[in-house]
Image (tube, helix red, strand yellow):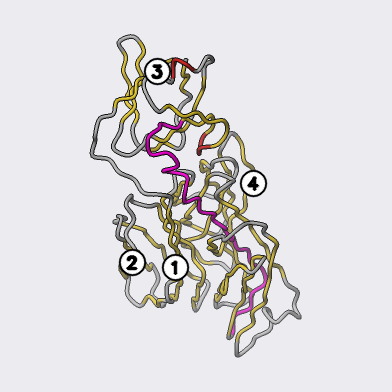
C-alpha cells in the first residue's frame, strides 16, 4: 500500500515504557493436589504489560507415568499467576524460572500439542523453548527441531508422549541469543549409577555479549530408571555462560537436552526520540530507519521508503493518507505487512 503521511499531534490515552525485563527462579513446589495457584509480583511495576517466558528447571517424579502442565494467566503490569495442574495420583515436584519482558523485538507464545509434530511461527529462525507440560508414560520425553521453513519451525515430539506443552520465545538476533545443549552419557557415568546423593556436572560456553539476562529450561530427557529426576541449576555469566545439570538419589539419567537463552536489553530503543515517528525497513526495528518529526518531512524524502515496523511517540498518533483512505498508526508495532512511504 502506498501512502502520503501526516503527523497529528493529538493527545491520546496511550503510554509505553522503555524496554524492561525482570527474571526470577521460583522455589521448588511439590504438587500433592490437582491444582496449585502461585501469585507472582514484579519487584517494580511495568508501564506496559510484558510477555512472560517461562521454563522448567526441575522435574522430580516417582515413576514414568507423568501428567502435568503450567499455565501463565492474568498477566498485567504488576505481575501474573502461575497455575500448576497435575493429572496423576503421585506427587510431582517442579521448579520454574520466568522472564518478564517488555520489548517489541520479542514475542512469546504457548503451544499445546496432542500430535507428534508441532509447527510454530518463529522470527529470524531465532528462538528458544522449554517444556512446561507433558502427559504420557515412558522413560523419554523430548522435542527436536526438524527444519525451519518460511518462518515456521517444525518440531518433532517423542512418540510416547500423549500431550506436550511448550513455551516458545522468538525475536530479533540483536535481543535473543539461544543455545540448545545436548548431553549423553555411558554406563559408567555418575548419572547412570544408582547414587544416594547428587550427581551434577558443570558445563559452559562462550558468549561475547554485555550483561545478558540468562534463563534456561529442560527440553529433553531419557532415564534408565523408573523414577525421573532432573535439574538445571546455577546458571550465571562470568565472561562465559556457566551452569550445572544432573540428577539425584535412585534416578539414572542417560540423555538430556537443555535450552539456555541470553536476553540483551536495549533500554534506549523505545524512547530514543520522544518527538519523532521512527519507521524501520525490517521487522523488529532492524535495517534502515527514517525519522519523521513534523508535517512535510515525508514529502521531502525524495525516494520511496518501505517499512515493516514502527515506533510512534507516546501520546501521539500518525495518519497515513491515500486519497480518501486514512489509516492511523499509534504505539509500537514490531512486524506489519509492508507499507510504502512515497
- Say left or right for 332 vs 200: left
| Residue that numbered label 1 is attached to | 24
x, y percentage for residue 77? Answer: 30, 55
CB within 8 Å, label 3 to label 4: no
Q: Secondary structure at mark 4?
A: strand
**Label 3 vs 2, first from the N-terminus:** 2
Q: Secondary structure at mark 1?
A: strand
Between the residue at mark 3 and the residue at mark 4, the CA separation in whole angstroms equals 50 Å
**Label 1 vs 4, first from the N-terminus:** 1
Between the residue at mark 3 and the residue at mark 2, the CA separation in whole angstroms equals 48 Å
| Residue that numbered label 4 is attached to | 146
**Label 3 vs 1, first from the N-terminus:** 1
Identify the residue at image location x=73%, y=79%: 189
Highlighted magenta segment, given as a residue range: 250-278
Q: Nearer the viewer, mark 4 or mark 2?
A: 2
| Residue that numbered label 2 is attached to | 40
Q: Nearer the viewer, mark 3 or mark 2?
A: 3
**Label 3 vs 4, first from the N-terminus:** 4
- Say left or right for 145 vs 315: right
Q: Nearer the viewer, mark 3 or mark 1?
A: 3
The quadrant in which residue 259 appears is bottom right
Q: Secondary structure at mark 3?
A: loop
Magenta-span inclusion, residue 262? yes
Between the residue at mark 1 and the residue at mark 4, the CA separation in whole angstroms equals 31 Å
Amino acid at each position: 500500500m502506498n501512502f502520503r503521511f501526516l503527523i497529528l499531534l493529538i493527545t491520546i490515552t496511550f503510554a509505553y515504557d522503555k524496554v524492561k525485563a525482570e527474571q526470577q527462579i521460583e522455589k521448588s513446589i511439590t504438587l500433592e493436589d490437582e491444582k496449585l495457584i502461585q501469585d507472582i509480583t514484579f519487584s517494580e511495576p511495568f508501564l506496559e504489560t510484558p510477555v512472560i517466558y517461562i521454563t522448567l528447571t526441575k522435574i522430580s517424579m516417582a515413576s514414568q507415568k507423568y501428567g502435568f502442565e503450567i499455565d501463565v494467566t492474568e498477566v498485567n503490569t504488576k505481575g501474573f499467576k502461575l497455575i500448576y495442574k497435575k493429572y496423576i495420583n503421585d506427587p510431582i515436584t517442579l521448579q520454574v524460572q520466568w522472564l518478564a519482558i517488555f520489548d517489541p523485538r520479542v514475542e512469546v507464545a504457548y503451544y499445546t500439542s496432542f500430535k507428534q509434530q508441532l509447527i510454530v511461527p518463529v522470527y529470524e529462525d531465532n528462538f528458544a523453548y522449554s517444556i512446561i507440560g507433558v502427559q504420557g508414560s515412558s522413560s523419554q520425553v523430548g522435542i527436536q527441531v526438524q527444519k525451519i521453513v518460511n518462518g515456521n519451525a517444525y518440531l518433532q515430539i517423542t512418540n510416547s508422549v500423549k500431550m506436550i506443552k511448550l513455551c516458545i520465545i522468538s525475536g530479533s538476533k540483536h535481543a535473543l541469543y539461544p543455545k540448545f545443549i545436548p548431553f549423553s552419557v555411558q554406563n559408567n557415568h555418575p548419572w547412570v549409577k544408582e547414587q544416594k546423593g547428587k550427581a551434577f556436572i558443570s558445563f559452559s560456553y562462550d558468549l561475547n555479549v554485555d550483561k545478558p539476562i540468562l534463563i534456561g529450561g529442560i527440553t529433553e530427557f531419557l532415564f534408565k530408571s523408573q523414577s525421573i529426576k532432573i535439574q538445571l541449576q546455577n546458571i550465571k555469566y562470568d565472561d562465559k555462560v556457566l551452569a550445572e545439570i544432573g540428577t539425584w538419589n535412585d534416578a539414572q539419567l542417560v540423555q538430556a537436552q537443555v535450552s539456555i537463552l541470553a536476553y540483551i536489553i536495549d533500554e534506549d530503543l523505545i524512547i530514543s526520540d520522544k518527538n519523532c515517528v521512527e519507521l524501520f525497513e525490517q521487522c523488529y526495528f532492524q535495517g534502515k530507519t527514517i525519522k519523521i518529526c513534523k508535517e512535510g518531512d515525508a514529502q521531502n524524502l525524495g525516494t520511496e521508503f518501505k517499512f515493516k515496523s514502527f515506533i510512534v511517540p507516546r501520546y501521539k498518533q500518525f495518519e497515513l493518507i491515500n486519497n480518501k483512505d486514512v489509516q492511523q498508526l499509534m504505539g509500537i508495532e514490531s512486524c506489519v505487512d509492508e507499507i510504502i512511504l512515497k
